[in-house]
Image (spheres, helix red, strand yellow):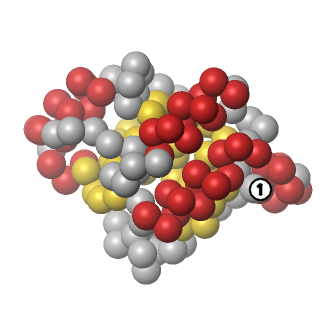
Amino acid sequence: MELKPGQVFKLYCATCVKQKNKFFVAALIEPVLRCFLINSKMTELQIAKDDLAFECIELSKDKHPFLDHDSYLGCNQLFVEYTAKALCQIVHGSPGRFVGCLDRGVMDEALSRFPKNISLPQKRIRELIEAWKSPA
């Protein structure tokens, strides 16, 4: 499987506060696979701070059939939990772990917000802007 930004996988999150299966969104593929997570809701801190809320993009279950309720794409943190090779092996052994792709409109919304992101290093923001210009 060729990995592309915007692809969504249901994987175990060992580094999350509550360790469980989560939706991982491929954000950057090279040189290291970095993923955003999809969350059911924003944190209290994200709700309280406009600049942090700005980094959370609403995902409609109507446009993302793998979701069972509206959720949020958290563009405030990149997770390096799986290598690209390991993820491809997981998907090869369990094809159901790949659940779909983000709606292109959501990707475009994220792309428009990346320049004002205050949580990620500028180097990552530049990489994200370049990687997300092409559709998944």
Residue 52 in the figure: left or right of residue 134 = right
Q: Could you tell me which residue is drawn at 33 percent across and 23 percent down?
A: 83
The residue lying toward the viewer, choosing from 119 and 122, is 122
The percent coordinates of residue 26 (x first, y second) are 40, 41
Image quarter of residue 44 = bottom right
Taking depth in this image into account, of 123 and 92 the one nearest to the observer is 123
Establish if 45 lies above or below 89: below
Residue name at image x 44 percent, y 34 percent: 28
How many C-alpha atoms fall within 10 Å of the one at disc 1: few (<14), some, or many (≥20)? some
Q: Report whether 89 appears left or right of 50.
A: left
Residue 25 visible within the image? no
Question: Residue 51, relative to residue 83: is it above or below?
Answer: below
Instruction: Point out the image quarter for the N terminus.
Output: top left
Looking at the image, which residue is at 30% across and 27% down? Answer: 84
Q: Which residue is mark 1?
A: 53
Residue lying farthest bottom?
62
Based on the displayed image, in which of its 4 quarters is residue 118 positioned?
A: top right
Label 1: state its secondary structure: helix
Left or right side of 126 for 46: right
Residue 111 percent coordinates (x, y): 58, 51
Q: Is residue 52 visible?
A: yes
Q: Report the residue at 40% width, 19% height from top.
A: 31
Name the residue furthest top. Answer: 31
Where is residue 20 drawn, in percent x and y?
45, 43
Rendered location of residue 131, percent (x, y): 45, 39
Report the amino acid beneath label 1: Ala
